[in-house]
Image (spheres, rainbow, N blue to C red):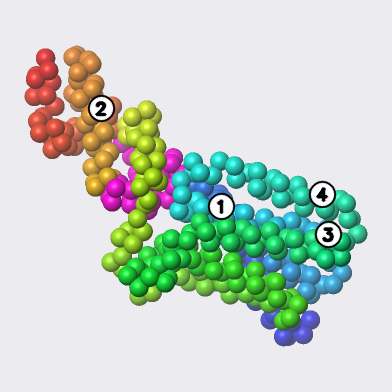
């Protein structure tokens, strides 16, 4: 390789290497362990494999056909990974029950084509008019269109002057539009260069994480005062999430964990923490702490009523309060009486 080729290889492979690392982070390290992080990690992994194949194939025409087929198998899974990441960002896990079927069917189809046509990675599937690679890109495009439909409410904000994009909206749109650009780059590489797709991925990858940096540092690219006002949870969705939240509290009594955090509850519900926070603040009209304390006081009342000999201090700890003083102050604030007086009133 000459110097220009070395630089071209470096920049085209840079995004692949970092995407692999970030996908591992989302799979094994990132907290909370929710379905949205899983699909984002899967999306990055599939893109890294597909783009990595492109890089090595561009600089090595003799690349083994098995590696090329692995890259194409990953390519056909990019679409569903994008779709279910978008879906997990705006909908609850209850609407994603059949996601493994999408991946299994497409992966099985890719393996079948590989066995039927061992000597080529791009056989003609429908006469001489539609090849396997073209089908793969059609599948990818179909999932892109479906993803656009899922996040249509966010897309509509671009054309609505009365609404501003929140940082979360901006992130969702960036991932979606970035995927569209990569698809277009690969689809039109016959008119430009095959390596353009890899370079586009590296550029978009670093652009996305630059946006994350701005968000974390409260950069001017985002509206600091905009939190949830421009992203309302639809009534039906809010009701379903409220039912799921109430089940966790009433049936599983997760509030008895003194160290319970909003991210823990969100993880159990398979939604993003900000979605849960929005549900509690906007739809239930209270803070997370207030909500948890209400359930704890309700449980404390039940324990006091059901067992006349139970010690009040034990009641507090059993309900999730980490100290006697906190239990007494919160109980009085919510029940308008102390635990001791409440116990006397029901004796």
Instruction: Find disc 1 in the rendering and name its residue.
Output: 84
Q: Name the outermost residue toward the right.
A: 119
Q: Earlier in the sequence, mark 1 or mark 2?
A: 1
Magenta stretch, residue numbers: 257-283
Q: Is residue 291 left or right of residue 23?
A: left
* Rendered location of residue 340, percent (x, y): 11, 24
Q: Earlier in the sequence, mark 1 or mark 3?
A: 1
Does dot 2 land on a helix, a strand or a loop? helix
The label number, if any, that marks residue 285 in the structure image: none
Q: Earlier in the sequence, mark 2 or mark 4?
A: 4
User: How far apart are labels 1 and 2 at the CA level?
Assistant: 38 Å
Instruction: Find disc 3 in the rendering and name its residue.
Output: 126
Crowding near pointer 4: few (<14 within 10 Å), some, many (20+)? few
Crowding near pointer 3: few (<14 within 10 Å), some, many (20+)? few
* Rendered location of residue 261, percent (x, y): 35, 44
Instruction: Find disc 4 in the rendering and name its residue.
Output: 112
Magenta residue check for 273: yes
Crowding near pointer 2: few (<14 within 10 Å), some, many (20+)? many
Q: Is residue 3 above or below residue 335?
A: below
Magenta segment, prevailing SS (helix, strand or loop): helix
Q: Is residue 295 left or right of residue 197?
A: left
Q: Earlier in the sequence, mark 1 or mark 4?
A: 1
Instruction: Find disc 2 in the rendering and name its residue.
Output: 299
User: How far apart are labels 2 and 3 at the CA level?
Assistant: 65 Å
User: How far apart are labels 1 and 4 at the CA level?
Assistant: 24 Å
Does dot 3 land on a helix, a strand or a loop? strand
Foreground of the two, 250 or 98: 98
Q: Identify the residue at horizontal 49%, vertical 41% (top origin).
A: 94
Point out the frontmost of discs 1 and 2. 1
Does dot 4 land on a helix, a strand or a loop? helix
* Rendered location of residue 314, percent (x, y): 23, 24
């Amino acid at each position: 390789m000459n110097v220009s080729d070395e630089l071209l290889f470096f920049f085209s492979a840079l995004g692949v290497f970092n995407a692999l690392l970030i996908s591992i982070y989302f799979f094994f390290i990132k907290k909370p362990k929710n379905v949205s992080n899983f699909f984002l990690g899967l999306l990055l992994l599939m893109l890294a494999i597909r783009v990595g194949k492109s890089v090595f194939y561009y600089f090595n025409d003799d690349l083994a056909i098995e590696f090329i087929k692995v890259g194409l198998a990953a390519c056909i899974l990019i679409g569903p990974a994008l779709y279910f990441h978008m879906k997990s960002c705006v909908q609850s896990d209850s609407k994603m029950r059949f996601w493994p079927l999408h991946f299994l069917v497409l992966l099985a189809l890719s393996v079948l084509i590989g066995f039927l046509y061992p000597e080529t990675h791009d056989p003609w599937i429908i006469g001489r008019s539609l090849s396997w690679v073209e089908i793969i890109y059609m599948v990818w495009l179909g999932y892109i269109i479906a993803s656009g439909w899922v996040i249509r409410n966010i897309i509509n904000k671009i054309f609505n002057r009365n609404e501003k994009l929140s940082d979360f909206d901006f992130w969702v749109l960036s991932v979606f539009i970035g995927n569209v650009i990569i698809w277009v780059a690969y689809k039109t590489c016959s008119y430009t260069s095959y390596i353009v797709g890899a370079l586009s991925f590296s550029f978009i990858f670093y652009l996305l994480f630059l946006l994350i940096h701005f968000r974390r540092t409260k950069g001017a690219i985002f509206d600091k005062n905009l939190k949830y006002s421009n992203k309302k949870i639809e009534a039906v969705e809010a009701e379903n999430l409220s039912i799921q939240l109430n089940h966790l509290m009433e049936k599983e009594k997760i509030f008895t964990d003194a160290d319970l955090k909003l991210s823990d509850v969100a993880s159990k519900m398979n939604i993003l923490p900000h979605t849960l926070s929005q549900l509690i603040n906007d739809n239930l009209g209270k803070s997370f702490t207030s909500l948890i304390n209400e359930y704890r006081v309700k449980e404390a009342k039940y324990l006091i009523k059901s067992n006349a000999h139970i010690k009040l201090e034990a009641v507090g700890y059993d309900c999730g309060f980490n100290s006697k003083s906190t239990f007494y102050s919160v109980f009085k604030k919510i029940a308008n009486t102390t635990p001791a007086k409440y116990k006397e009133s029901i004796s």
